[in-house]
Image (cartoon, rainbow, N blue to C red):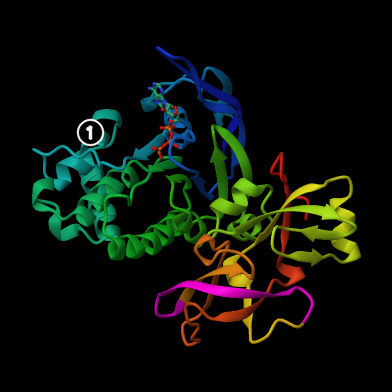
């Protein structure tokens, strides 16, 4: 079994200003064959976590296992894990073939014929078999990316670690490579930890996402679990594009009272909020409906601010009536065929089935 287990893993760096806790008591089990994406904003500790699994950093505390094997104190070479870096880290003076076979010649007992076979099989799998005699300088960014992947694949490791491998590619190629990488991982069935700060990559590629913030694990779950049932306000705001809307409210007699609106709650929701008063009401842009006139429950008069057309959909900035339109508080996404004009009055519906409620102080999800 090639599951990767992190138990109580902490990494503290020291610099002139004192201790920096890059990773704080991380417990995570990446299952055998799983594609796990480690996601979070810049500086949250993603790369440090990956580098500890690779053996490039030593944890200050905690242990890491690969299957039953403790690997915390092994050298990178002893771990049977291959890492692909954002920079690709190819040797510029070697051919593609040389770059892909180098690690095998150094660290395995394979014969020359076996190495050639592995390199050619991987090159074929990645569609770079016609490039084996070129040098990295003669390749496009996407092709170099494949060589870096090829170098990891030929080692047939127990786990792959990928650190923002698509970051240097243009948007179109990145989208293509997302699909390709995912298919490749599925066909190889190798346990993979993939680091990115891009929530779209996390959502589309992973079996499960682990969301980190400030060195602390916020949630581990399938993309849909993190999207529909975020543990806290941080995950709710990080997963989903455009981000979830957050409105500060207080709970008064079963009603959420905001600065420009009052939102009555059903018994079910009230029960979840018992004992809390300072709250954040969350609603995703795609869950807000624009209606002609706001007459029903959970419908409010609003003013349309800037409208950003994206073709298939429009992003609409909205302000509650009574609020300055330039301080628009809500973002909604609506179908691209619907026309909503800037400066007009509309009704907006915030359906109760779609709302999230968080504790304003702790950020914990209550409903
Ligand atoms: P990014 O997406 O920007 O690469 P990240 O989530 O990968 O960020 P890390 O590179 O793991 O974040 O860094 C986590 C924290 O640890 C940051 O505050 C960073 O400044 C700090 N850090 C990382 N490496 C070192 C180091 N060698 N010495 C001191 N501090 C470090």
Q: Is mark 1 on a helix, strand or loop?
A: helix
Decide if residue 142 is on the left or right side of residue 291. Answer: left
Residue 135 visible in the displayed image? no
Name the one closer to the observer, 224 or 70. 224
Q: In which quarter of the image is ligand 1?
A: top left
Q: In which quarter of the image is the C terminus?
A: bottom right
Quarter occupied by residue 159: top left
Q: Is residue 252 left or right of residue 118?
A: right
Give above or below for 184 relative to 116.
below
Stretch in magenta: 296-313
Q: Nearer the viewer, residue 97 or 354?
A: 354
Q: Is residue 343 magenta?
A: no
Question: Quadrant location of the N terminus?
Answer: top right
**Residue 63 horizontal/vertical position (percent):** 58, 23
Report if residue 132 is visible in the image.
yes
- Is most of the magenta stretch helix, strand or loop? strand
**In the image, what residue occupies the spot 50% across and 46% down?**
39
Residue 188: image location, x then y, percent = 43, 54
Give percent across and percent down for residue 230: 66, 53
Examine the structure image and report whether residue 304 is included in the region drawn in magenta: yes
Drawn side of residue 36 relative to residue 152, left or right: right
> Where is residue 92 drawn, in percent x and y?
12, 39
Q: In this view, does 3 lie above or below 143?
A: above
**Residue at which label 1 appears:** 105
Q: Is residue 282 left or right of residue 306?
A: right
In this rendered view, identify the residue nearer to me: 346 or 336: 346
């Amino acid at each position: 079994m090639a599951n990767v287990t992190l138990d109580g893993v902490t990494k503290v760096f020291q610099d002139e200003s004192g201790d920096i806790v890059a990773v704080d008591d991380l417990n995570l089990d990446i299952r055998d064959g799983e594609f796990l994406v480690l996601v979070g904003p810049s500086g949250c500790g993603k790369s440090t976590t990956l580098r500890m699994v690779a053996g490039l950093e030593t944890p200050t505390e905690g242990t890491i296992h690969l299957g039953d094997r403790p690997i915390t104190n092994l050298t990178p070479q002893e771990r049977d894990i291959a890492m692909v870096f954002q920079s690709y880290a190819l040797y510029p003076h070697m051919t593609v073939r040389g770059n892909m076979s180098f690690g095998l010649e150094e660290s395995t007992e394979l014969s020359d014929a076996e190495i050639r076979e592995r390199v050619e099989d991987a090159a074929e799998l990645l569609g770079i078999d016609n490039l084996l005699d070129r040098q990295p300088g003669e390749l496009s960014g996407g092709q170099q990316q494949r060589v870096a992947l090829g170098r990891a694949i030929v080692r047939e490791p127990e786990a792959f670690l990928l650190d923002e491998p698509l970051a240097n590619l243009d948007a179109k190629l990145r989208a293509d490579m997302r699909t390709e990488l995912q298919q490749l991982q599925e066909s190889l069935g190798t346990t993979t930890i993939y680091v990115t700060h891009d929530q779209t990559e996390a959502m589309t590629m992973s079996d499960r996402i682990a969301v980190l913030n400030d060195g602390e694990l916020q949630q581990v779950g399938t993309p849909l679990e993190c999207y529909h049932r975020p543990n806290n306000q941080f995950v709710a705001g990080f997963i989903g594009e455009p981000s979830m809307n957050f409105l500060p409210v207080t709970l008064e007699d079963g009603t959420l009272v905001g600065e420009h609106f009052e939102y009555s709650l059903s018994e079910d929701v009230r029960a979840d909020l018992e004992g809390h008063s300072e709250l954040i009401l969350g609603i995703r842009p795609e869950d807000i409906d624009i209606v002609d006139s706001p007459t029903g429950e959970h419908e409010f008069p609003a003013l349309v601010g800037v409208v950003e057309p994206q073709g298939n959909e429009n992003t609409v900035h909205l302000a509650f009536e009574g609020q300055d339109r330039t301080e628009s508080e809500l973002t909604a996404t609506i179908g691209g065929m619907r026309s909503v004009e800037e400066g007009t009055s509309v009704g907006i519906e915030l359906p109760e089935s779609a709302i999230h409620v968080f504790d304003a102080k702790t950020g914990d999800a209550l409903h």
